[in-house]
Amino acid sequence: MEFDSLLKLVRDDPIFESSLFLAGNVDPKLIRIQLSRWVKAGKIYQIRRGLYSIAPPYQKRQPHPFLVANHLQKASYVSLQSALAYYRLIPEVVNITTSVSTGRPERLETPLGIYEFRHIKTEFLFGYRMTDLGDQNGLVATPEKALLDLIYLQPGGDSIAYLKELRLQNTDGLDKDLLKQQSERFRTPKLQNAVKGILRIMSGESEEFEDL
């Protein structure tokens, strides 16, 4: 296969899988060899086994980090610090794309950035939506679920000290009722305790108070 044929086949897709070329009467070994040659030539990036992206200057669209994360692990969505920063709920600039997944925890360093996956139980795989990322779409937690995921996975995440350390901002965009409803699905006092603290912070109370 010529590289021009690859570009025509991939078209505008920012991410593609090697399985795209395995339809019909083809030799999978030869396809893998050709893809490997293009990776070495700097024409495509290998993100992980079987997953690729066209490299500059040939790419028509740069893959959004959230879209890449969705492809790196199935049954995953962007959450935690990355989603909170995306919604401008925390002031920090996050250089690692963080997701939650029913798969194994892992940290991947790729040509398209660093990606971290935290494991959650299957019953907690809710509270995300397909989100418009400009010219692409990706699965991202709601603001409320991103916050709850972080608290759930963080030891001591329900403490007032930790909640204040997050320096939550722009909390007017949080849906208090949804926050309560989603927290109840975790069925743990930790999340109920955290929501009480979050609501007090959102109310603007500035006095010191003990952990609830």
Image (spheres, helix red, strand yellow):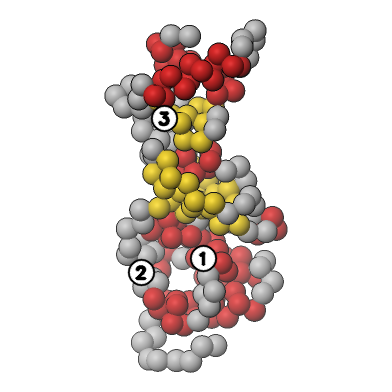
SS for callout 2: loop
Q: Disc 2 to disc 1, how far (Cα)?
A: 16 Å
Q: Locate residue 80, reporting x and y percent.
A: 48, 60
Residue drawn at the location 43% of the way across and 51% of the way down? 97
Q: Which residue is mark 3?
A: 45
Residue 179 vertical placement versus 16 (above, below): below
Q: Locate residue 135, reporting x and y percent.
A: 39, 34
SS for callout 1: helix
Q: Dot 2 surroundings within 10 Å: few (below 14), some, or many (20 or more)?
A: some
Amino acid on which disc 2 is placed: Gln
Residue 100 vertical placement versus 166 (above, below): above
Q: Disc 3 to disc 1, how far (Cα)?
A: 31 Å
Residue drawn at the location 55% of the way across and 29% of the way down? 50
Of 119 and 196, which appears nearest the observer?
119
Q: Which mark is residue 150?
A: 1
Amino acid on which disc 1 is placed: Leu
Residue 23 vertical placement versus 117 (above, below): above
User: Looking at the image, is mark 2 or mark 3 earlier in the sequence?
Assistant: 3
Point out the residue furthest to the left here: 57
Q: Locate residue 212, reporting x and y percent.
A: 55, 88
Residue drawn at the location 66% of the way across and 68% of the way down? 186
User: Looking at the image, is mark 3 or mark 1 earlier in the sequence?
Assistant: 3
Amino acid on which disc 3 is placed: Tyr
User: Left or right: where does residue 167 sit relative to residue 188?
Assistant: left
Q: Which mark is residue 169?
A: 2
- Which image quarter: residue 8? top left
Q: Disc 2 to disc 3, how far (Cα)?
A: 37 Å
